[in-house]
Structures are given as structure tokens and as C-alpha cells.
Image (cartoon, rainbow, N blue to C red):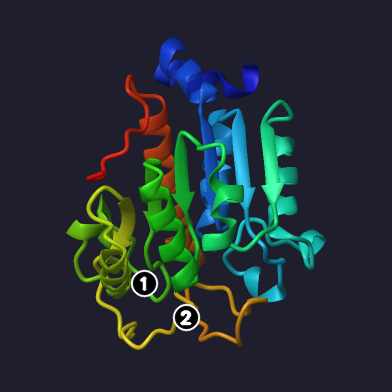
Amino acid sequence: MERFSRIHRLLGDKRFRRLQEKRVTVVGLGAVGGYVVEGLARAGISTLRLIDYDTIQPTNLNRQILALESTLGRLKADAARERVLQINPQCNVEALPIFAADETLDDILSPAPDLLIDAIDSLNPKVQLLAGAYERQIPTLSSMGAALRTDPSRIRLADIFDTDNCPLARLVRKRLRRRNIGRGIRCVFSNEKVDFDYSQASDEEQVGETPYSERGRERNVLGSLPTVTGIFGLILANEAIMQLSSDTGPVFQGEK
């Protein structure tokens, strides 16, 4: 297809065809997840499942690529699907406006995607999704905390158990250990120091940008830049593209 000719030229025929054949599920379509979807759609991914129960609000306009005057009040999942189809009408894209939790994981993860990308900004759903994917041996990329950061040069990719100076990653690791989840979840994080204590977070404490949830009380809203959150999302998308187009494709790296 002419619209993907530059991707095809860079990757070559075999790698580009591999990329097109893969199925990716993205959970969380906010400041980070929206840019993940943007990168994947423009790379020619042909099958996407997009998960987010939330709607687009005026507070999203400063940093979320899906947030426009024309999309205010709409479900993020529906807006994301519409945007993907504007980029690639031939993409097989499914939008599911559901909340990620233990009881919805079968809906989210069945059939198993070739790659799961987690961009959830609430702690307990994030841990439940990561644990559920790990137990199902689904290769996963995850976003740690992008809020409060201002220095894009401090953004890194690593196994969640190799991150440093990221309070959210530390807390997620602690909860994953309780569920006997080990190494094998690759994540984007920043090692920039921030003045915020996640240690007292409740099960549904907000860890990103969304100010409200249908499940729980009003959350603590953290400040964030459109630049840093967008870079987080595009780094995840780039890592996904490299894995999906490789000879082996994404491989589960866990200890099961």
C-alpha cells in the first residue's frame, strides 16, 4: 500500500509483512496509550484491539492525541477506532469500552494477542492486567509513570525488575511479587527524580493523568507534559514495531 511505502522500504518485505500479520491489544488510551495507537496505526499494524472505558474530557486536551473539541464526551475507545480507520481503512480494529480488572481479563486477552501494551493509569487494574497477561504467557510492554517528569533524556526501556528511581515501578513490582509474578515484563520508565510518594496508594490510586473513574472516588490528579507522555507512548510503539517485525516476533520472557 502506498501509504506504508516508507515503512516497507525501511523494514523490507519480510519484516513489513510480519508486522502486518500481528495482533496487538492496547489497554489504556490516554496520554500515553493514544500515542501508542497512533504509532502502530501509522506503521501498518493490521489488527488492533483497543480497550478503555473512559470518555474524553476537557482536561485531556493538553496532552491526549485523541482529545479534540470534536471528540469531547466521546468514548476514548470509539474515538481511537475512528482515528485508526482514518489512517488505515483496512485495519481490523476492535474497540471495547470496558474496565480492566480480574473479571474482565478474558474479554480483554482472549484470543491472546501477539503483544499486549499496558498504558493504564490506575494502580490495581494495572497490576491485575500485568499479572493476568503474565499467567497467560502473553508478551507485554508496559508504561510506568510519565506524570511529573520534564526531562525526556531520562526515559529508558528495561524489565520492570531492572528499573531505577521510578516510584510507580517499585510499587507495581511489590504487588506483582505478591502474585508470584517475576521477571519478563518490559516497560518504559523515567529515572528522573520526582517528589511524589506512591507508597500509600490505595488499590485504585491514580498513577497517571485521568482525574475520574466510574469505579471509585475522585483521584489525585498528577501534572504532566504533553511532550513527555507522548514520548513514552511513541517509545512503546517503536519497541512494539521492532519486536513484531523481528524474525521471532514478541516472545514471552517470563519464568513460567
Q: Residue at x 26, y 44 (%)?
A: 256
**Residue pointed to by mark 1:** 149
* First along the sequence among labels 1 and 2: 1
Q: Residue at x 60, y 87 (%)?
A: 218
Q: Which secondary structure lies at badge 2?
A: loop
**Residue 202 visible to an observer of this rendering:** yes
- Give the mark toward the camera: 1 or 2: 2
Amino acid at dot 1: Arg
Q: From what the image shows, is residue 218 above or below residue 254? A: below
* Left or right: where 15 falls relative to 91: left
Q: Nearer the viewer, residue 157 or 176?
A: 176
Q: Quadrant of residue 72?
A: bottom right
Q: From what the image shows, is residue 194 above or below residue 237? A: below
- x, y percentage for residue 99? 62, 63
Instruction: In the displayed orientation, state which residue is furthest to the top.
Output: 13
**Residue 235 visible to an observer of this rendering:** no
Q: Residue at x 37, y 27 (%)?
A: 249
The label shown at residue 208 is none
**Residue pointed to by mark 2:** 205
- Distance from disc 1 to disc 2, alpha carbons, whole Å, reads 19 Å
The answer to whether the residues at label 1 and label 2 have Cβ atoms under 8 Å apart is no
